[in-house]
Image (spheres, rainbow, N blue to C red):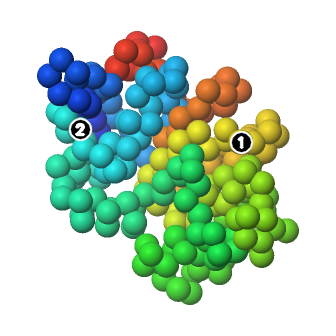
C-alpha cells in the first residue's frame, strides 16, 4: 500500500486578478502511516490553510490531494464531510465543543457521529480522557473548564476515534510545557497502537525535537530541510 496521504503540486489562492494572493505555491509531499508530523512556519505562512485542504474543509485552486489512495481534493462536499466524520480527527484552535455536554459526552459525541460500534464507546472515551489527564474532570462542562482543559477535550475526542489521520492546529498552544509533552506522548502512544498519522502545526521548539518529521512552510512552499 502506498502513502496514507499524497499532495501533488497543491496550490491555494485567494482573491482574483490583481488582488489575488497565492498562499500555497505547489506543495508536493507524501505522508506515511504511523507518523507524528509537524508543520512549522511564521504566522500567515499557510499552515492552517494546508490543514484545511487536507481535511477537505477547503479545496485547492490547483493540484491534487490523495487520501488512502483516493483523490479527495475534487470530491463533492457531502463526500468530504463523510470522510472527515469517519476517517479523520480534527482539532481546531476553537475546540468545537458542545457547550451543554460534559467532557465524557463531548468525546462520546465524536464516536456517535462516526458510527463507531456502541459497545466500544465507554472504553474508548475512558482511555482517551485518561491519556489527556482529565479523568477527574470528566463530568464537567466546557464552561467549567480552563482554555487548556477544553483544548485537551478536543484532543481526546479526536484520539478516541483512532482514525487513520488526525489534523491538529496548534493542539498544545494553551498548555504549559508539562501538559504539552503529555499530549505529544499521548499521540505517540496512539501511533504505537494504531496506523494513525498525526499532522500538527506548532511553534514549540521542544516538540519539534521529538516528532518524526518537520516540514517548514516558507513563501508558500516546503523549504528544503
Q: Position of residue 154 (x, y in %)?
A: 61, 58
Tell me if residue 195 can be seen.
Answer: no
**137 is higher (above) or lower (below) than 195:** below
Residue at the front extreme of this rendering: 19
Give the x, y percent position of residue 120: 57, 80
Please tell me whether residue 17 is drawn above or below residue 134 in the rendered image.
Answer: above
Q: Position of residue 192 (x, y in %)?
A: 59, 52
Residue beneath the point at 40% across and 28% down: 46
Distance Cα–Cα, label 2 vs label 1:
30 Å
Q: Nearer the viewer, residue 125 or 43?
A: 43
- Of all residues shown, which one is farthest toward the bottom? 119
Q: Is residue 146 left or right of residue 192?
A: right
The residue that appears at 23% across and 59% down in the rendered structure is: 77
Residue 44: which disc?
A: none
Identify the residue at image location x=59%, y=80%.
121
* SS assignment at label 2: loop
Residue located at (31% from left, 67% from top): 82
Residue 179, placed above or below residue 105: above
Residue, disc 2? 60
Question: Residue 184 or 41: which is nearer the viewer?
Answer: 41
Determine which residue is flagged by label 1: 174
Of callouts 2 and 1, which one flags the residue occurring earlier in the amino acid sequence?
2
The image quadrant of residue 18 is top left
Residue 71 lies left or right of residue 138; in this view the side is left
Q: Outermost residue toward the right?
A: 136
Pointer 2 and pointer 1: residues touching (CB < 8 Å)?
no
Q: Residue furthest left?
A: 17
Amino acid at each position: 500500500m502506498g502513502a496514507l496521504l499524497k499532495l501533488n503540486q497543491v496550490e491555494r489562492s485567494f482573491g482574483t486578478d490583481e488582488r489575488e494572493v497565492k498562499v500555497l505555491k505547489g506543495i508536493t509531499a507524501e505522508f506515511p502511516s504511523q507518523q507524528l508530523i509537524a508543520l512549522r512556519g511564521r504566522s500567515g505562512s499557510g499552515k492552517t490553510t494546508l490543514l484545511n485542504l487536507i481535511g477537505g474543509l477547503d479545496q485547492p485552486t490547483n493540484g491534487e490531494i490523495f487520501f488512502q489512495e483516493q483523490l479527495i481534493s475534487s470530491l463533492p462536499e457531502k463526500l468530504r464531510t463523510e470522510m472527515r466524520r469517519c476517517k479523520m480527527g480534527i482539532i481546531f484552535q476553537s475546540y468545537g465543543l458542545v457547550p451543554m455536554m460534559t467532557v465524557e459526552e463531548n468525546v462520546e459525541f465524536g464516536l456517535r457521529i462516526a458510527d463507531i460500534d456502541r459497545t466500544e464507546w465507554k472504553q474508548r472515551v475512558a482511555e482517551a480522557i485518561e491519556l489527556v489527564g482529565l479523568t477527574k474532570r470528566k463530568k464537567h462542562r466546557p464552561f467549567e473548564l480552563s482554555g487548556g482543559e477544553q483544548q485537551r477535550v478536543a484532543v481526546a475526542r479526536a484520539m478516541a476515534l483512532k482514525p487513520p489521520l488526525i489534523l491538529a492546529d496548534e493542539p498544545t498552544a494553551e498548555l504549559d510545557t508539562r501538559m504539552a509533552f503529555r499530549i505529544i506522548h499521548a499521540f505517540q502512544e496512539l501511533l504505537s497502537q494504531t496506523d494513525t498519522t498525526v499532522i500538527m502545526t506548532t511553534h514549540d521548539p521542544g516538540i519539534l525535537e521529538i516528532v518524526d518529521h518537520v516540514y517548514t512552510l516558507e513563501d508558500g512552499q516546503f523549504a528544503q530541510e
